[in-house]
Image (tube, grey):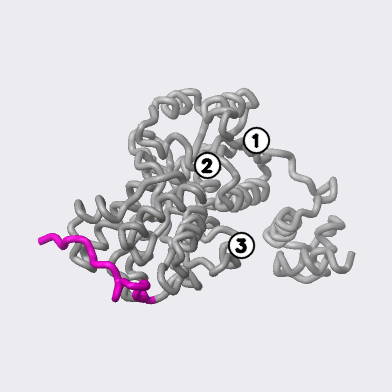
Amino acid sequence: MTARLADIAAQAGVSEATVSRVLNGKAGVAAATRESVLAALDVLGYERPVRLRRRSEGLVGLITPELENPVFPALAQVVVQALTRQGYTPVLATQTPGGSTEDELTEMLVDRQVAGIIYVSGLHADTSADTGRYDRLKARNVPFVLVDGHAPKVRATSVSPDDRAAARLAVTHLVSLGHTRIGLALGPERFVPVRRKKEGFLTVLRELLGLDPAVAERELVRHSLYTLEGGQAAAAALLDGGCTAVVCASDMMALGAVRAARQAGLDVPGEVSVVGFDDSPLIAFTDPPLTTVRKPVRAMGQAAVNALLEEIGGTPAPPGEFVFLPELVMRGSTAPPAPRPGAGGPAPAPARGV
């Protein structure tokens, strides 16, 4: 019990005596302090005493595309904790290959009378998808928020990382190390985050290296799947084209790029540098530790919950996009370019534009 009190007190930033007073329902504790202690119980996974349990404000759905990419469970954890602290019961609904579609999961949640829904990397991020489904959901008075992939036609709040800035951070870092032939491994082109990363990539190559965007896109950009295998395939093609560095649209793709380099007999980072995106849990412990652009998962998850609860409460923010800045995290997968065996120096850059 003493260890438990100490943990709760440390999490809430109060004394153990204060925690004891809250748990025993004693008077003399400020309301804000009491809420901090109860929030600490929730975060640490302790059950509240029965007399202190808050009546559920209702269910809130969270629809994610899958859970194999570690960034999605990390974001889900932030959302779940934030909803729980506000008295809501989160319902996680995950799409799987051959399983329920986003529309089917939406109907399931609506049938259960959820108070609102948060969509993560859903069909709103797919430029080829019909956004009418969200208009119909709004007509049913179901509040919702979109995460990762702004859809201008949908009158809703969106929460996104600055994908263009992410590409700029990665390329600027690699150019500062001396790389001039830098490849970009992306997911399918129809997705909004993919298009934004490519825009940022081509823009910064033009600004820093004077590369013609059309030539750079043709020679230095490869689309594949958002998987380790997809990153491996895209990176293999870029390495065959003489790239000394590869920027990847996810950490999973970056691990595939490291595998592709090693299969080609190239050392990472001695001969090939690799940069990921997300800063997924445990990615700092790969071999080598991965340089990556950190997605602001905690800030994005909290913003999505705040926006949804405001709409549920009847004071929605105007439709629009909240964009959060990413951060470059330098680790061991990037280094200055080294001449490849028999090459005499880095591969030449593509033709420069005017």
Identify whether 252 is placed above or below 123: below
Q: Indicate the amino acid at tag 1.
A: Leu
Instruction: Describe residue 156's horizontal placement relative to residue 251 as left or right.
Output: left
Residue 188 percent coordinates (x, y): 39, 42
Identify whether 204 is placed above or below 137: below
Secondary structure, magenta segment, majority class? loop
Q: Indicate the amino acid at tag 2.
A: Leu
Which residue matches tag 2? 308
Q: CA distance from mark 3 to mark 2?
A: 30 Å
Residue 83 percent coordinates (x, y): 63, 46
Q: CA distance from mark 1 to mark 3?
A: 31 Å
Q: Quadrant of residue 149?
A: top left
Residue at image position (44%, 67%) is 266
Which segment is the magenta one? 336-354
The secondary structure type at the circle numbered 2 is helix
Going from the N terminus, do you reach mark 3 or mark 2 first? Answer: 3
Residue at image position (36%, 32%) is 128
Q: Residues within 10 Å of mark 1 (few under 14, many from 20)?
A: some
Residue at image position (65%, 26%) is 112
Which residue matches tag 3? 282
> Residues at badges 1 and 3 in contact (C-beta under 8 Å)?
no
Residue 338 lies in the magenta-colored region: yes
Instruction: Describe residue 177's horizontal placement relative to residue 49 as left or right.
Output: left
Q: Which mark is residue 59?
A: 1
Residue 274 percent coordinates (x, y): 43, 64
Going from the N terminus, do you reach mark 1 or mark 2 first? Answer: 1
Q: Quadrant of the N terminus?
A: bottom right
Depth check: 223 or 74 in front? 223
Q: CA distance from mark 1 to mark 2?
A: 12 Å
The residue furthest right is: 1
